Every structure is written in C-alpha cells, then in structure tokens.
Amino acid sequence: MVPVASIVSATVRQPSSAAIGFGVDHAVGRAVAGAGLVDSTGLGADEAASDGVTGAGDAADDAAADDGDADGLDWLEHAATRAASDMTTASRRARAAGQEVRVRTIMGTVSDPAVSATSPRGGLPRGWLAAVASCTHSARSTSGVPLADVPFPESTVKFGIQIPSFTWPGGAEAIGPTLGRIARQADDIGVDSIWVMDHFFQIRGVGPAEDPMLEGWTTLGYLAGQTTKARLGLMVGGVHYRLPGLWVKAATTLDVLSGGRAWLGIGAAWNEDESRSLGFPFPPLGDRFEMLEETLRIAHEMWTGERGTEARFDGRQYHATRLMNSPQSISKPRVPIMIGGGGERKTLRLVAQYADATNVFGGPEQIHHKYEVLREHCETVGRNFDEIERSNLQTIYLARDSPQQIVDRFGELSDAGAQTIIASVVSIDDPSQLERIGREILPHLKAL
C-alpha cells in the first residue's frame, strides 16, 4: 500500500506525514500556490513539502493582487465543495483497498477563467485549490480494482453531543420526555457519544444559575435506558463532588446497565459558587489535584482483574481498606477515563499517566499545542501517545453556520489532531437540528 499525496498543509502546521494519502482538500491549500507545479508520482510528502510550501504566502498574495474576481470566487467555493469531497473520497477508498494513488496537481494551466480567480489577500480558503486540482488530477489503481468498487472506510473522526441545558418548553414535567426523545434521535443518527455536565446550577455562558440543571449520574442512567449504541459520560465530573469509591461504582453501574457504554469523565473542578451554595467542600486547587490523582489511582485498582485488587489504599487525601468492585465493568480493560482540561503542567501529565482520553478547549492552533504538550508527557512517563483519544468541545449553531462551514471547521480541528468532536447543539430540543446533523454533517465527517 503506497498512497501518495505530495502536499503538506501549512495553514494548520500539520506534520507532513499526516498529509499522505488523504485530505487532499486540506493538504492543497497554500502549498500548491507556492509550488507552481507539483507532480506527486513517487514523491514523498516530506520532499514535496519543501517544494510546495516555499513561497506559498508570497505566491498567494501575488495572485490575489492580480485578480480578485468575486464571481469567480463564488464559483470556486461551489466547485471546491464537490472537488474536495471527490478527491478525498477517492484517496480514502484507494488506501482502504491497498491502492497507490498518484495525483498530479497543476497550477496555472487551467483554461476556465473562473477557476483562475483567487481569494482575498491573506491566504486561500480550505479546499480552494482542490477545485483547481480536480480539473487535472488523476488516480490510477495498481491493483486494477475500480475505486468505485471499494467500500468507503469508517470515519476516523468520532462525533458526540453534549447536552448542557434543560431549559425547554413545558417546564419540569417536559424535561424527561424531551430528553428521552433527544437521546433516541441522537442514537438513531449515529452519534458516538452523549454527554451531560456535572453541575448542580446552570453555568455562566449557558444561562442563569437558576435555570434547570439535572444531577449528572442519574441523568446518564436515564439516558442508558433510552439508547442502545452511544457511549455515555459526564463532560466532565468535578472530583470533589464524590468520594473515589462512589465515582468508580457509579461508572461501573452505568457500564453494566448500559451494556458496556460508560465513560468516566472527571477533572479537578472549578465551580466554587455552586459548591459553597450547596455545602460541598471546595478545597484549594492543589488539594483538588491530589484528590484527582488519588481517585484515578483508586479507579485503576478497582478496575483491575475480576473484582479489583481488593488492596488497601493510603493516600494524602483518601484512605480505603478494600478496593473491591463487583460486578466488574463490561468495558475492558476498564471503563475508559476522560480527563477534562488543558493545564500543561498537571492536567495533561495526569492524562498521560492515567487516562484514555483528553478533552481540551480552543481552536486548531491551541489544541495542536496542547496535544504536543501531551505527547511530551507521554514520552516522559513511557506512554504511547496514540493510545489516548483526543477530543475537542464545540458548538453547532445551524441558524448561523451552514453545514459546510461546520464540516470545514471540524476538518481544521481534525487536521490539528482532534479525533473526536463533541458538540453542544443550539436548540437541540428542535428535532430538525439533529435531523440536519445526521443528514448534512455526519456523512461528510467520513472525508476528514
């Protein structure tokens, strides 16, 4: 299997190796503009990158200065959507079939004047040069199997939803039925996971503290009865709200009753106001990090073997005499653990040592930096970085952003290293929102 795609994406600082064989719409970008002519046949991505990236910014600016035809740009945006999808689909199918993909991308020889139009100064939009490339690219199969006959590979980008608000028409009586309908619909359209917050008051940025808020583990138990496929978890739990044994037993119970679909999402917490208001102790941050690490150590012991290590535990924050867990989780080797937060010195170190997933905030540049910090921690502790699932929390607002804009944004996050996108959906109680996501967004994640 020798897939080749000779361009590296300069806009998201993606390692060149990640451009090989897929994401031609991402990879073309500004690099082709600088290359002028790139023939990828037999060319490795690293070698092509040195040719393609050099001068890309200057070339793009020069082109923009020569011609900024708005009508042509509109045409390109439409063409790029189809071209990027076609090229990426062909490349991914070829890889799945063990085929060699040879793509010849030529800039400056396209006769259609509309295709020659350029973007505004400052860089080319994602997928723009894919429209140009689609006019001249070719893919040849070394096995003789037509690309159309190769099954489409499963998406490498997972998609989950977070439900952060329960302020819906009908008041408290309508919360249960509405939540159940949302969960069933999300499960039906194929979301990978469903998450709720671990708060007792509504949080700033979502609504006033007085808005309805459900306790997290109870809500997940309800969702387990409404769904059959999606994994379920807290995004993420506040460590000080429960003792370690309860964290593990609650997650195990959810895992057993859901048929192995639980996550343990947990972090050092931050909401002092709701903690003080309801009488939860709120220790200093340093103590909460100690609580978090000891909770993670206890979780690993309780999810070991047939019913836990049954050992004694003596830490600075917690003491336990018999770490037994029966029944044991269905998920193996344990209920997967997600640690939320991007603290570079402590949080990401704990991810490297104890977690199966990380969730960090921010755009492509920010999350790429966080993932690189995580990689360094993994090297320090001897952990395989690729064992850790990398997720990012986003918002889907279909009244403001088109499905294509959302897919493009998720593509940039994927290029930066995110493997799972978890989205809060504005007006999720409106069935048309998840319907559109299932029809207009999820199928296109297969091309990322």
Image (tube, rainbow, N blue to C red):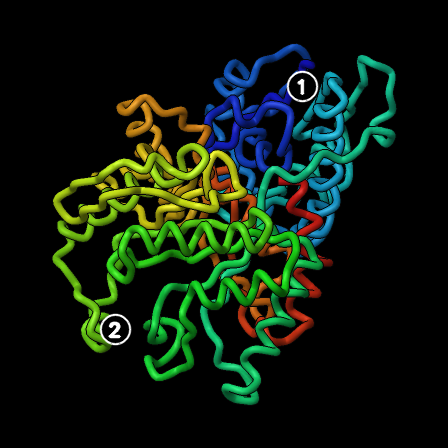
Q: Is residue 259 visible to us here? A: yes
* Mark 1 residue type: Pro
Tag of residue 274: 2
Q: In the image, what residue occupies the spot 49% across and 44% down?
A: 329
Q: In the image, what residue occupies the spot 17% across and 66% down?
A: 281
State the SS at label 1.
Answer: loop
Horizontal and vertical percent position of residue 124: 55, 43
| Picture layout, residue 301 above or below residue 396 | above
Q: In the image, what residue occupies the spot 14% across and 59% down?
A: 283
Residue with the mark numbered 1:
3
Foreground of the two, 293 or 245: 245
Horizontal and vertical percent position of residue 141: 81, 18
Density class for disc 1 (Cα within 10 Å; few <14, some 14-19, many ≥20) is: many
State the SS at label 2.
Answer: helix
Mark 2 vs mark 1: in front: 2
Foreground of the two, 223 or 58: 223
Density class for disc 2 (Cα within 10 Å; few <14, some 14-19, many ≥20) is: some
In this picture, residue 226 sits left or right of residue 374: right
Q: Quadrant of residue 313?
A: top left
